[in-house]
Amino acid sequence: MGNVRTEAGGVLPETRHEHVRRRNKIMLYTSLSLIVIISLGFLIRVPYKAVATGYITTAEYADVRASTSGRVAEILVSSGDTVKKGDPMVNLESDAEQAAVDEASKLVSKAEAELTLRKATATENKRAHADAIKLAELELKYANEQLALTKSLYEKGLASGRRLSEDTFAVEKCEEFLRVTKAKDLTLEDKQIAVLEQELESQREALTRAQAELKKRTISAPIDGTVTRYSFYVGEMLRTDMVLYEIFQGEANCIKLRIPEKYAEKVEVGTPLRLTLGTYGGIIPHKFDGKVTYLRGVVEGTADSYYRVAYCEFDPESYGVSPGTSARAKLLLGKQSLWKFIFEP
């Protein structure tokens, strides 16, 4: 080994063995520190919150949508208007449907007129038939009386045998006429009337269907309340999945939230939330407390954003909160590890 010279009081340089030991110590302490930090990151639990947005609604509310697709012809109601159940709100273009109703109405009127005429004819024919039977019965009665008189005269030698034969033939002729008259079949007219009645019923059903299709072209209010209108315009093609209006009834004590799909499965009835309202925002916004009361079972949205709709109750305290006010809520979904909180997107 070489000699190492140092000054008085100096520190000897570490040997290779000492260097290795020091490096191993540092690595050990670093590893232990990392294990402790990582373990603490899993052990430390922080609140797991989901952010959802929505707006204030009422306990009684309704989405208004078109029951069939169509182009807007007339907008009758705007935001802030008050409506009654059944009031028309939007008219869709309905030329084809109105034409179908007009055509069906004409066919019904035609069928009704034909049925009325056929019934009147049948009634007249039945009356004439009854009169013919009465007349035939009278003629038979008269022929029988004449035959009885001729027989009496013939027995006394006052009438010829020819006259007796003629009167006997007259009675037989009247009997045959009465039989034929009574046997006349009038059920054919009844069958024809039954067919016309079926045709009329079919035409009326077609008219009812046409009227129902025409009615769909008018979008009406499903409940009483105050209206909030969504953005749509005259001439726009509406789809059945588009919300056109919302109608609010009663006090504003309900929140409609859109919860992102990735959080929705963790939300359940009773999940608590803290709420910030657009009206009471600012640097230090007022917080309202609430909870989830109903969660729709279907996922909604577009290709870019999927969500589930939740309805929540909250305490408005003494604040006058209006329906339609925007809301931002944090839903407490439980606890999660610190690492998940930091790194989960």
Image: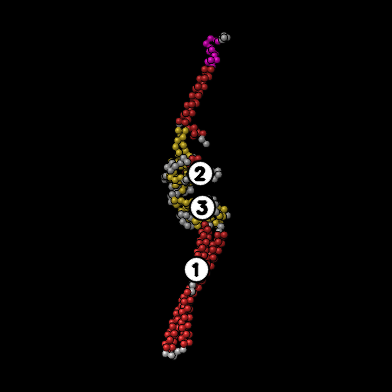
Dot 2, how many residues are within 10 Å of its Cα: few (below 14), some (14-19), or many (20+)? many
Is residue 330 visible from the viewing direction of this image? no
**Does residue 15 show up magenta in the picture?**
yes
Q: Which mark is residue 191?
A: 1
Image coords of residue 109 (percent x, y): 52, 67
Question: In the rendered image of this protein, does residue 91 appear above or below residue 33?
Answer: below
Front: mark 2 or 1:
1
Identify the residue shown where x is 44% and y is 37%: 334
Q: CA distance from mark 2 to mark 3?
A: 19 Å
Identify the residue shown where x is 47% and y is 38%: 49
Q: Which mark is residue 65?
A: 3
Q: Nearer the viewer, residue 270 or 110?
A: 110
Front: mark 3 or 1:
1
Q: Nearer the viewer, residue 340 or 314?
A: 340
Image coords of residue 238 (percent x, y): 55, 52
Circle 2 is placed at which residue position?
307
Image coords of residue 215 (percent x, y): 51, 58
Q: CA distance from mark 2 to mark 1?
A: 62 Å
Q: Amino acid at mark 2?
A: Tyr
Secondary structure found at label 3: strand
Q: Nearer the viewer, residue 333 or 247?
A: 333
Q: Are marks 3 and 1 in contact (CB under 8 Å)?
A: no
